[in-house]
Every structure is written in C-alpha cells, then in structure tokens.
C-alpha cells in the first residue's frame, strides 16, 4: 500500500559575502522563494531610539521596574534599604523624593545594576 507523504520544507541560510552569480542562479531556480537580507547588525546602545528612550526613563521608574522584577513589595524594599517606609519608596518611584547617593548605592548593590541607572 502506498502512502502519500508531504516532504518538509527545507530552509537554507547563507551568510557572509555571497557572490552575485550564486544569488542570480538561486533566484532563477527558486524564484520568489529566495529572499536576500542586507541588514546590518547595530549595537542598540548606539541608536538614536535607545538614547531617546533612555532619556525618558526616570530613576524612580528604574527602581519600580527592578523592584517588581525581584518580586518585592514597596514595604520589602523599604526594609532592605534600612527601614524606609512604604511611603518613602512610593515617593522615590514617583520621582517626588530624590534618590540620595547612599540609597542609589544600596539599590545598585541590591539589584546588581550600575549606579548610573539610578542617578
């Protein structure tokens, strides 16, 4: 008994400098199935987009982000910082209360991030 089986699609990626003759030959054989991507990889930190976003993120938003990533409440964070009240942590996160250098150092050690992200 014969069984009809579909052949799985084959995907081939080629990287580097590919001679134009090979690309033309592949397009002749495979037509529209051939895609050429000339994208260059760029360090995201060198882009204007990254710098614009970074400029908009406040130190308070950074504290809130990392606190949530570490699954901590404002009360938990306050206790780890040396009996800060929940209110004080909330005010730091809302950029009402500035983050002192001492607190920024504690936060950078606690979250294992650069102190520059908090100042």
Image (tube, helix red, strand yellow):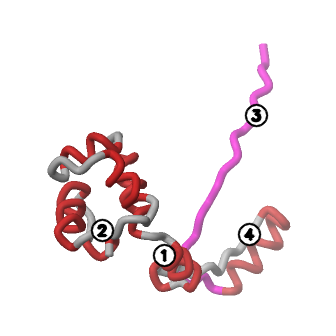
Q: Disc 1 or 2, which lies upstream in sequence?
A: 1
Query: Which percent across, then down, holds residue 63?
Result: 36, 59
Q: Earlier in the sequence, mark 3 or mark 1?
A: 3
Residue at point 32%, 54% (across, down): 88
Q: Which residue is mark 4?
A: 35
Helix or strand or loop: what does disc 1 sit on?
A: helix
Q: Which residue is mark 2?
A: 99
Number of numbered tags placed on the structure image: 4
CA gap, disc 4 to disc 2?
51 Å
Instruction: Please rate how many residues cluster around mark 2, counting C-alpha atoms within 10 Å: few if below 14, some from 14 to 19, many from 20.
Output: many
**Does the stretch in magenta take in 93?**
no
Quadrant where the C terminus lies?
Answer: bottom left
Residue picked out by circle 3: 6
Left or right, residue 74 beside residue 55: left
Nearest the eye: 51 or 45 = 51
Q: Is residue 4 above or below residue 38?
A: above
Q: Kindly check if marks 4 and 1 are in contact, taking CB atoms under 8 A apart as contact.
A: no
């Amino acid at each position: 008994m014969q069984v009809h089986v579909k052949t799985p699609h084959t995907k081939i990626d080629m990287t580097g400098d590919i001679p134009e003759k090979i690309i033309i030959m592949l397009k002749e054989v495979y037509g529209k199935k051939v895609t050429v991507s000339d994208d260059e990889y760029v360090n995201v930190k060198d882009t204007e987009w990254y710098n614009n976003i970074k400029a908009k993120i406040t130190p308070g938003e950074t504290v809130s982000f990392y606190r949530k990533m570490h699954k901590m409440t404002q009360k938990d964070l306050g206790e780890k910082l040396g009996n800060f009240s929940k209110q004080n942590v909330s005010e730091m996160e809302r950029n009402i209360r500035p983050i002192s250098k001492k607190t920024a150092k504690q936060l950078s050690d606690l979250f294992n991030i650069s102190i520059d992200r908090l100042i």
